[in-house]
Amino acid sequence: MDNIRCAVVTGANKGIGFEICRQLALEGIEIILTARNESRGVEAVNKLNASGISNVIFHQLDITDSKSVQNLVKFIESRFKKLDILVNNAAESGIVYVDINKFKEGGALMQVTDDNVDNLTGLIEEPYDLGERCLNINYYGTKRVTDALIPLLQLSKSPRVVNISSAYGDLHWFHNEELKHELHDIENLTEERIDEVIQCFLRDFKVAKLRENRWPLTCSAYKVSKAALNAYTRLMARKYQNILINAVHPGYVVTDMTSQTGILTVEEGAQGSIMAALLPDDGPSGAYFDKTKLAPFASAERPI
Ligand SMILES: NC(=O)c1ccc[n+]([C@@H]2O[C@H](COP(=O)([O-])OP(=O)(O)OC[C@H]3O[C@@H](n4cnc5c(N)ncnc54)[C@H](OP(=O)(O)O)[C@@H]3O)[C@@H](O)[C@H]2O)c1
């Protein structure tokens, strides 16, 4: 069993997560493809099996549900006794496309910037409940899964955690310089402080004080969720020095999340994560990759 490497990928029934499963399986790694919806997950595994990939199994996982997370932990304990790779991929955007055709005509991603916020009215919307859900999945859900699987990762000889982040998590998008500094200053930042920042954001979001309090104005909850995930990645890397824990921006990829407006295929979008999952033992930890290249957490220039 020691020679068999195994990986968990969250939210892997479609999109980039599905492709990460496929590419890691081709490396000979045993894959636990997880999805919150059982039939969508089983269908995804069947698709891989039908293409000749047999080293992929399904396990249900809703990352917002502690019981579901605990069931996965028990399953891995009994079946593999350890975990080598965790890819935290599951996420939601927190937005709804109101007029996707107009959004595409306007240049899609290029126009989702704060100086363009007024032009986006009627194209995309960010209801509070979706924003709150986005933070619960992208940040709190990812943290829940990671914290629960750390003991099994500690039993691996070469543990890796890949947090799929986003260029939207770049601190460049924040307008509050003090907060930017705080989220970047990893020596003094704590998980409790990240939590306070998120709760403060949600309070401001609820009462429409995003502009007043200098939060990102477009894809706001998503940007806060990924910036928080980046900070958590760095804190975890410092805490668990035997595990290589990194964040990866996959690029702008053709998936349901981008309503198929991306410019990269899922094969291209999975490359950075595959590289981070297969890093050699002397590879970086607590780092951020823009696709396959090391990049800063707070860019001076617009990161997209
Ligand atoms: N596509 C891009 O251009 C892009 C750019 C930057 C970053 N990313 C990041 O890349 C990752 C993958 O995105 P994608 O584009 O492949 O998106 P996608 O096609 O929408 O897939 C998202 C996956 O996450 C799952 N998910 C959502 N909430 C979940 C939960 N509570 N528990 C378990 N699974 C859950 C979804 O399940 P259901 O099918 O059940 O909804 C789906 O399988 C995300 O972290 C995203 O933020 C994507």
Image: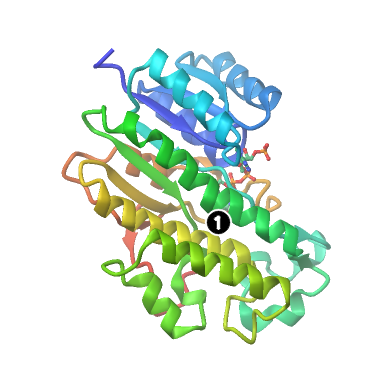
Where does the image place residue 19, in percent across and percent down from the top left?
A: 52, 35
Q: Does the residue labelled 1 lie within 8 Å of ligand 1?
A: yes
**Is 5 above or below relative to 86?**
above
In the visual, does 202 lie left or right of 237? right
**Is 284 above or below relative to 25?**
below
Where does the image place residue 89, in percent across and percent down from the top left?
A: 51, 43
State the residue at coordinates (36%, 33%). 85
In the visual, does 132 lie left or right of 82? right
Which image quadrant is residue 25 in?
top left
**Is 122 above or below relative to 161?**
below
* Residue 269 visible from this viewpoint: no
State the residue at coordinates (47%, 51%). 250
Where does the image place residue 3, in percent across and percent down from the top left?
A: 24, 16
Identify which amino acid the numbered label 1 is placed on. Answer: Tyr
Query: Across the whole image, how many numbered discs are drawn on residues?
Result: 1
* Residue 10 visible from this viewpoint: yes
The residue that disc 1 covers is: 252
In this figure, which colouring scheme has been used for the structure? Answer: rainbow
In the visual, does 3 lie left or right of 104? left
Which image quadrant is residue 97 in?
bottom right
Where does the image place residue 214, in percent across and percent down from the top left?
A: 57, 83
State the residue at coordinates (75%, 81%). 118
Task: Report the image quarter containing ligand 1.
Answer: top right
Q: Which of the image's four quarters has the N terminus? A: top left
